[in-house]
Image (cartoon, grey):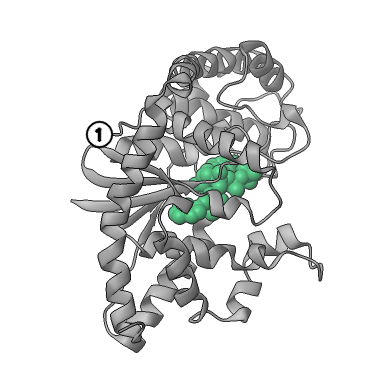
Amino acid sequence: MKRVFSGVQPTGNLHIGNYLGALKQFVDLQNDNECIYCVVDMHSITVPQDPKELKKHTLDIAALYMAVGLDPKKSIIFAQSMVPGHAELNWVLTCNSYTGELSRMTQYKQKSKGEESAPTGLFMYPVLMAADILLYDTDIVPVGNDQKQHIELARDLATRVNNKYGKTFVVPEGKFMKAGARVMAMDDPTSKMSKSAPNEMSRISLLDEPSKIKKAIMRATTDSEGIVRFDIENKPGVSNLLSIYSAFSGKTIEQLEKDYEGQGYGALKKDLVEVTVDALAPIKANFNEIRESQELIDIMKDGAERANAIATPVMNRVKERFGLGL
Ligand code: ATP
Ligand code: LTN
């Protein structure tokens, strides 16, 4: 069995990009692998968070994990801050990373906007992510396309330490969806759908009302050609709608192009509203039930214990290799 690890930040409601790019894979992987899914609360404090809200959001994401189909009997679900190894390994990896390679991370460049007052945590974000992954001897990391560069860094750090100190870490592989690896914003199909974009209509959240979903899809930016055809370069809006449709319905893009031949974008959008609303309805119903239940906290405590039991021997190995402690 391969070991799988991934994480999601507890910031705001998850959108269909998070679902189609990441969470859907989490669920698919849990039957044939040993899966560890973390709510990365320590990553979220790289920018200021309201403490009460943060706790709430951590439980929200754990409940969403289960609402989309993660089974706590099969997958380990917990919050990053509940296992001390993440912070410990973060330091060891920090001492083996270079400021040059971290300065080249696109997410850092975008989020820091080159400002002197950018938080150091933002700069170190990818090292903590590498620590999350390497702490569990992870083989596979299911994520959206935007995380490719961070996965590459985790691989580089693992290889670097292995070369210098002897085999210490498993070198992990990223895993990306065919359709859904990069869901674009509804209002601007040249930038990725994001939790933090100011325009609510740019995203479809997993807990959105059907009326909101309808509005966002019907208003989605397309083009004036009027032909339903997949062409990311020239028709990013229509291509994005086709990708989302394909990911939710399981139909291929070619099939969808045929189905909508001779029809305008209106028909495509109308059906996509239905497909999306139907796909999200059970998630929403499950979420409300799980979020209210007392069990959720017990599941996370149990998850943290199980995660810690895997992390401790890895951390002991790291300390041994580096000569830390007695
Ligand atoms: P934001 O959406 O605000 O940019 P983020 O990327 O920091 O947030 P996370 O919650 O950390 O969001 O991401 C969880 C997972 O969702 C990651 O695997 C990430 O690659 C994936 N993901 C995020 N946005 C998209 C998207 N638009 N399309 C596909 N996958 C995505
Ligand atoms: N950086 C990721 C979240 C994340 C993660 C991880 C993903 C933190 N640690 C470890 C996979 C494995 C993001 O999606 N923004």
Residue at image position (52%, 31%) is 60
The residue that label 1 is drawn on is 73
Left or right position of 302 against 181: left
In the figure, residue 289 lies in which quadrant?
A: top left
In the figure, residue 313 lies in which quadrant?
A: bottom left
Residues packed near mark 1 inside 10 Å, few (<14), some (14 to 19) or many (20 plus): few
Residue at image position (43%, 42%) is 178
Image vertical order of residue 3 relative to residue 285, above or below: below
Image vertical order of residue 153 relative to residue 143, above or below: below
Residue ranking furthest to the front = 326
Image vertical order of residue 54 relative to residue 218, above or below: below
Q: Position of residue 255 (x, y in %)?
A: 44, 24
Q: In which quarter of the image is ligand 1?
A: top right
Image vertical order of residue 98 relative to residue 227, above or below: below
Residue at image position (34%, 82%) is 325
Left or right position of 52 against 178: right
Left or right position of 181 against 164: right
Work out whether residue 121 can be spotted.
yes
Which of the pair 8/275 is nearer the observer?
8
Q: Where is residue 237 in the image (x, y as percent from the top left)?
A: 67, 33
Work out whether residue 151 can be spotted.
no
Q: Where is residue 34 in the image (x, y as percent from the top left)?
A: 24, 47
Total labels drawn: 1
Residue at image position (36%, 60%) is 173
SS class of the residue under badge 1?
Answer: loop
Which of the pair 155/250 is nearer the observer?
155
The quarter in which the C terminus is drawn is bottom left
> Disc 1 residue type?
Lys
Q: Position of residue 46 (x, y in %)?
A: 65, 57
